[in-house]
Amino acid sequence: MLAATLLALAAAALHAGWNLIVKTSGDRELAAWGQFVAGGIIFMPFVVVVGLPPGPAWPYLVGSALVHLVYVEGLVRAYHHGDFSFAYPIARGGGALAAALLGAMVLDDTLSIAAWVALAVVAGGLISLVRPGAARASVGWALLTAAVIGGYTVIDAAGARHAGSQVSQRFAYGVTLTITTAVALCIVGLAKRRGGAFVRMVVQQWPLVLLAGFCLTSAYSLVLVAVSIDGIDVGYVATLRESSVVIGALAGWLFLHEQLGRERLLASVVVLAGMIGLVTIGG
């Protein structure tokens, strides 16, 4: 339990970091594309040493890569239409709720009554983020992103369990997923004739692209290791990982100077309170 908790918290900090980089980028689509490519390149030597995931894991890898295309599109559009302190907590917190529900339905994960009460608190905090006048486009894209997050979290939890019993094998699954998603994004980007713009962006901003790629791949691979620990439910890790909602709300308020930053931070703290309830009494 302690190992899963620490892994999920580390992933939360890394995840908020790379999302903040996407939000503040001049071209968010190119930024997200570059992060996946950079993350795959940085960690590719690890896969070379450990080896690619076995055959049974590949249907999950391919499926998740396709779902990640929708994820990137939803995330970029949510950040285009809304503040970081608004879109990020809804997408991430909603993703935790979706993952918990899908984990119970698809993977036979078990959550106690107390866990569901804690998740209800999380939902209440997310609802309080939506104030009158909120842009419908931002809410819609953030909710779509949340649903997609829940979907690929469950897919990858199952895929990581097929990748092998060793931590290195499960981490290799996460790295391979970054690579397969990068390939899919390259195909889509080239089909849109954005290859030239992508190369120019990488040349101009390569240190930031590398940093973001490291954060992206590390964050999700740590989560996959955590959900693959015996006795750990997907909903537990996914929800704890979403403690990043507080980091995101705080960053939007302090660094991006977004309106309603304080109110959104308080709502995110309510979300975190539900997560703490899940950790302490809901498992």
Image (spheres, rainbow, N blue to C red):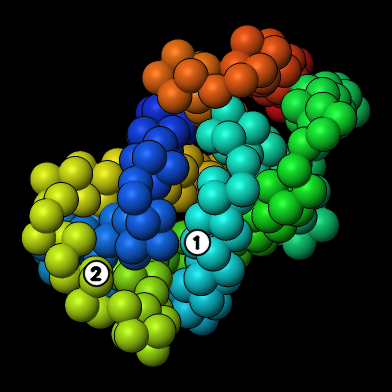
Tell me which corner region of the image, top left, top right, bottom left or bottom right, holds residue 129.
top right
Circle 2 packing at 10 Å, graded few (<14), some (14-19), many (20+), is: some
Determine which of the numbered discs, if any, sits on residue 72 in the image: 1
Provide residue 28's location: percent of width, then percent of height.
Answer: 40, 55
Residue lying furthest bottom in this view? 191
283 sits to left or right of 197: right
Say which of 123 and 4 sits in front: 123
Decide: is 100 above or below 260: below
Give the residue number, with chain letter if any, for mark 2: 198
93 sits to left or right of 165: right
119 sits to left or right of 213: right
Say which of 76 and 5 sits in front: 76
Provide residue 125's location: percent of width, then percent of height.
Answer: 78, 23
Decide: is 100 above or below 63: above
Provide residue 283's location: percent of width, then percent of height.
Answer: 71, 26
- Say which label, 2 or 1, has the lower sequence index: 1
How many numbered discs?
Answer: 2
What is the secondary structure assignment of the residue under circle 2? helix
